[in-house]
């Protein structure tokens, strides 16, 4: 089983390192700067379950022969990088190969199906608390490292059992699911509530719960997400429902969504693919979701402001006065009041 791990970030790097450590045949497809870092320093994972330091096999593009193509491509990129990820793995994947996406949300399924076909496209869910340091090292934040995959068609692709054997032998908490889309929806519901709450409040769950209406806000978001999932035929199990409620109302919890960490580093986010998709699904079924709409609008404002600030950075400081002068000169004198840069 030849595995191509697209990316060596927090999730892909962690699971790939575990597979490599257990003797699995895994290659990382990464950007050139990441390839240089991994070649020089190796891949470091700091984990309460045991640290890992490996020298991974890396490529920046596939240039091998037909016989060197991969049986499985594991896609662990951010949703906004999916299009470029698809183009990168197409030449590397064997004609019989399968794709395992570990992306958040649900919007990626259709785009992957369009390129690879539903019979080659599995579902996947990663439950993992990890972060990437400035040095490119992976920090595993707790002892949770569960990976779930499953076929979305019947019969399942022939390679699924072989891949499951690799995962099961890697030391990862692995589950081969027979209802993977429901598992994906359960995470989608939880993540939407967690991201909506922690990003809107810009704080961990424990801090939010100390505010006047924090608990009502968190549980209100959760309830709206559950209502949307129910309309799409996906009910959260009682066990998982109790688990998620406990996590979202844990006093003193330091839990945040990775989306908040993206905001704090002033980076792009998956808001459109998580909160935006949940809101659009609600609107399609005429479900009232005022808290989700608020959280989504908040993230849209962040993205709009980020785009504006980045566009301002493109203009060198010594040229900004010239640009402002040009702009102001094109405005009629009677309209110039309050027009400044």
Image: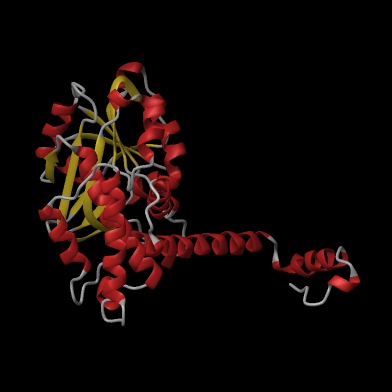
Q: Residue at x 41, y 27 (%)?
A: 114
In this rendered view, identify the residue nearer to me: 177 or 233: 233
Estimate the x, y position of residue 341 in percent, counting from the top left: 74, 72
Name the colouring of the figure: secondary structure
The image quarter containing residue 56 is top left
Q: Residue furthest front?
A: 286
Q: Is residue 192 visible?
A: yes
In this rendered view, identify the residue nearer to me: 224 or 275: 224
In this rendered view, identify the residue nearer to me: 86 or 279: 279
Against 59, residue 295 (above or below) is below
Q: Residue at x 17, y 35 (%)?
A: 24
Q: Is residue 162 left or right of residue 14?
A: left
The image quarter containing residue 128 is bottom left
Against 112, residue 296 (above or below) is below
Q: Is residue 269 left or right of residue 234?
A: right
Q: Residue at x 45, y 52 (%)?
A: 272
Q: Is residue 76 left or right of residue 163?
A: right
Against 198, residue 63 (above or below) is above
Against 332, residue 59 (above or below) is above
Estimate the x, y position of residue 42 in percent, counting from the top left: 29, 49
The quadrant of the picture occupied by the N terminus is: top left
In this rendered view, identify the residue nearer to me: 286 or 112: 286
Estimate the x, y position of residue 287 in percent, counting from the top left: 37, 53
Q: Is residue 132 visible?
A: no
Q: How many marks?
A: 0
Estimate the x, y position of residue 5 in percent, counting from the top left: 30, 38
């Amino acid at each position: 089983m030849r595995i191509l791990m697209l990316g060596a970030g927090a999730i892909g790097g962690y699971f790939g390192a575990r597979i490599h450590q257990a003797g699995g045949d895994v290659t990382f497809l990464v950007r050139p700067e990441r390839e240089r870092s991994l070649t020089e320093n190796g891949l470091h994972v700091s984990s309460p379950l045991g640290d890992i330091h490996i020298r991974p096999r890396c490529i920046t593009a596939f240039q091998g022969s037909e016989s060197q193509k991969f049986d499985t491509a594991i896609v662990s990129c951010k949703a906004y990088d999916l299009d470029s990820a698809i183009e990168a793995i197409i030449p590397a994947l064997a004609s019989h190969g399968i794709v395992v996406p570990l992306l958040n949300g649900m919007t990626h399924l259709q785009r992957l199906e369009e390129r690879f076909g539903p019979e080659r496209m599995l579902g996947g869910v990663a439950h993992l608390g990890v972060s990437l340091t400035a040095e490119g090292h992976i920090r595993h934040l707790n002892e949770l490292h569960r990976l779930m995959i499953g076929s979305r068609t019947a019969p399942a692709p022939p390679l699924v059992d072989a891949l499951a054997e690799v995962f099961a032998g890697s030391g990862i908490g692995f589950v081969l699911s027979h209802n993977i889309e429901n598992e994906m929806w359960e995470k989608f519901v939880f993540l939407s509530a967690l991201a909506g709450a922690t990003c809107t409040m810009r704080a961990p769950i424990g801090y939010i719960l100390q505010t006047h209406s924090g608990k009502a806000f968190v549980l209100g978001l959760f309830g709206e997400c559950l209502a949307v999932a129910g309309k799409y035929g996906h009910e959260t199990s009682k066990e998982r429902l109790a688990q998620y409620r406990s996590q979202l109302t844990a006093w003193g919890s330091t839990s945040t969504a990775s989306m908040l960490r993206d905001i704090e580093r002033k980076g792009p986010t998956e808001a459109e693919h998580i909160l935006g998709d949940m809101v659009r699904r609600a609107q399609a079924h005429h479900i009232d979701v005022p808290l989700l709409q608020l959280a989504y609008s908040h993230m849209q404002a962040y993205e709009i402001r980020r785009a504006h600030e980045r566009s301002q950075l493109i203009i060198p400081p010594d040229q900004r006065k010239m640009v402002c002068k040009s702009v102001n000169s094109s405005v009629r004198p009677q309209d110039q009041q309050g027009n400044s840069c």
